[in-house]
Each structure stands twice: as structure tokens, then as C-alpha cells.
Image (cartoon, grey):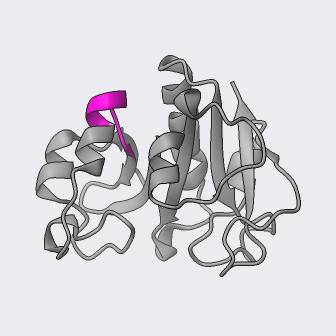
Amino acid sequence: MSYDIRHITKDEILHGFAEGYYCCMSNILGRKVRCDMWSTIYDRVGSIGVLARTEDWIIGQLIFMPKDCARRIGMPRGQHAEDVESTMVISCVMVHPQHKHQGIATGMVAEAVRFCKERKFRRIEAYVDPRPPQEAAEWVPSFSAFKKFGFAIEGPKTAWESKPDSRICYLDL
């Protein structure tokens, strides 16, 4: 299967994408409550994340935002590196169930790391399940896609209360 990984465009933020694909960005235009957060983040850093696409479908998505934005919307807080101006938070990694375990999440994480280094961020944080991919919670990505790049689990603190196996991981750039 052939796919490519590209950054989400401003047009996709403004007009929507991923019809029939569930994640935090799907059906952005159909929501009752609209906000300008994604456009503001895009204008500030040049992207909000990446999509993995085949010729016809979106098969994966990784969303990121600066840590100050993540804090404002209630994302879990790490115990270290409170430099919110130079920390990027990966807030969502989704791969379509039919395409899991094919390296798609790894490819999206690689592009996020490259982008953050290029933009001079000093740290990346993400919310992960440290268990093997087959055991990871449905909406919490497995740590395996991050470990390959040198990410480390921050500690024993649970990231999401509703998912007791979730942890915060980080990479200092």
C-alpha cells in the first residue's frame, strides 16, 4: 500500500476534511461550537499536524499544538519542562484500524519531530500507552512509535484519569 504524509493545510482547517473518519479534527465544520484555535495555531507555528493519505483516503492523523494552547484546553500536564513557549504537545495520533501496525504512526511521528526541530522547539511531549501496540488503549497511541526516536516515559503519573495506563512521554531536542 502506498501512502504519503503531508501537513494539514489552512484550507483543510477552514473547510474541513476527513469525512467519515473519526478523530478530534473530523467534522470540524459540523460542530455546534466553533473556535478559531486551530487557525490561530496554524498561523503561529505553520501547521497543526499531519495526515497520512492513500490516493483516496485519510488513513492516519497526528495533531500537535504548543504547550500553552494544550494547557488552555485541559490537556494533561507533564511534571517537568514548564517552558511552554518552546514545547510542542502531540495531542492526537490516530491510524485507521485497517492500516495499523504498518509504520504509519512512526512516519507521522518522524515528520512531527522533523518539523519541531526545524521550528526550534526544544521539547516534544505526547500522551501514550506504554504497553505493546496490540494492548494499547484505543484512543491512546502506543509508546512504540515514539520510542524509536528517543522519547522517554516521564514517570509513573497517569496522563488521562479515564485511561489508567496512559503516560506522558517526552523528547528533548
State yes or no: residue 53 in magenta.
no
Would residue 111 be found to the left or right of residue 167 on screen?
left
Would residue 29 be found to the left or right of residue 149 on screen?
left
Residue 159 at what x, y percent from top left?
70, 64
Residue in the image at 24% along x and 61% along y = 56
Q: Compared to 21, does 146 lie above or below?
A: above
Q: Nearer the viewer, residue 66 or 55?
A: 66
Residue in the image at 69% along x and 61% along y = 128
Quadrant where the C terminus is found in the figure = top right
Would residue 84 be found to the left or right of residue 45 on screen?
right
Q: Nearer the viewer, residue 83 or 26?
A: 83
Q: Residue furthest bottom?
A: 162
Residue 125 at what x, y percent from top left?
65, 44
State yes or no: residue 43 in magenta.
yes
> How many labels were placed on the picture?
0
Q: Compared to 153, does 17 lie above or below?
A: below
Name the image quarter holding residue 102: bottom right
Residue in the image at 56% along x and 54% along y = 105
Which residues, given as a range, are shown in magenta? 42-49
